[in-house]
């Protein structure tokens, strides 16, 4: 399996954190949560600070399929690492329910083109991504198979990632462990 296989089902997770707690969550997340989630069957493409929102942590988690998503989430969230650190992680969060469950329209997260800057656009409805986008997704219509972690159902949405800003995009600043840079 390649990293591209994990673009079949994607979660775009946007957490609003309590003021001043973003770096605390990122340090805990990168130290404790990346490897156990990947061992359970998820692939963490990107971990980001939202440049314009000092209390927002944005991350991307991919899976090979909806059944594999369910199995990976059950394993991780029932496992010892989450149990040991969930109180500390949850204490940093004001809201962790801004989550879009997506499927690919154009793959490219696994091998973004060279360049600097990561910009994401979230558009209501079914909007085509511009040619400059290196990856594009649309809302996954399947039911959420792991309801313990809610996903937004107010879509549909189109989401794309690019190297250049647009009028409706926001900039993501990669953390030290982000695979997308």
Image (tube, rainbow, N blue to C red):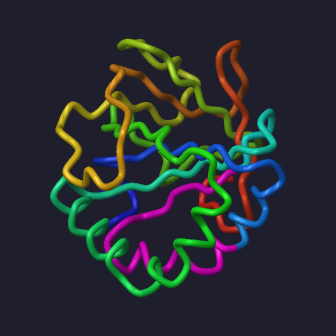
Q: Is residue 163 left or right of residue 136?
A: right
- Residue 38 inside the magenta-drawn segment: yes
Q: Is 41 or 14 nearer to us in this picture?
A: 14
Q: Is 12 or 4 nearer to us in this picture?
A: 12
Against 108, is 158 above or below?
Answer: above
Q: Is 34 or 160 nearer to us in this picture?
A: 34
For residue 47, which quarter of the picture? bottom right
Residue 3 x %, y %: 40, 61
Q: Is residue 99 left or right of residue 26?
A: left
Q: Residue at x 44, y 14 (%)?
A: 124
Q: Residue at x 63, y 72 (%)?
A: 88
Location of the N terminus by quadrant is bottom left
Against 123, is 179 above or below?
Answer: below
- Residue 51 inside the magenta-drawn segment: no
Q: Which residues are magenta?
A: 28-48
Residue 40 x %, y %: 33, 76
Against 3, is 74 above or below?
Answer: below
Residue 20 x %, y %: 84, 53
Q: Residue at x 73, y 50 (%)?
A: 18
Q: Main secondary structure of the magenta part?
A: helix
Q: Residue at x 75, y 47 (%)?
A: 173
Residue 176 x %, y %: 74, 66
Q: Is residue 31 left or right of residue 39?
A: right
Q: Is 141 or 160 nearer to us in this picture?
A: 141
- The number of callouts visible is 0
Against 136, is 10 above or below?
Answer: below
């Amino acid at each position: 399996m390649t990293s591209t296989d994990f673009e079949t089902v994607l979660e775009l997770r946007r957490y609003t954190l309590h003021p001043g707690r973003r770096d605390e969550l990122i340090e805990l997340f990168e130290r404790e949560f990346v490897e156990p989630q990947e061992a359970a069957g998820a692939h963490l493409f990107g971990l980001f600070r939202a440049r314009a929102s000092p209390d927002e942590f944005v991350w991307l988690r991919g899976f090979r399929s909806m059944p594999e998503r369910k199995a990976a989430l059950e394993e991780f969230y029932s496992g010892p690492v989450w149990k040991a650190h969930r109180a500390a992680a949850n204490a940093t969060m004001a809201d962790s329910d801004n989550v879009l469950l997506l499927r690919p329209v154009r793959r490219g997260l696994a091998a973004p083109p060279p360049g600097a800057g990561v910009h994401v656009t979230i558009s209501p409805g079914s909007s085509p991504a511009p040619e400059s986008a290196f990856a594009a997704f649309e809302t996954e219509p399947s039911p959420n198979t792991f309801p313990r972690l809610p996903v937004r159902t107010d879509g549909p949405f189109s989401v794309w990632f690019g190297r250049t800003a647009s009028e409706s995009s926001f900039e993501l600043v990669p953390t030290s462990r982000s695979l997308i840079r």
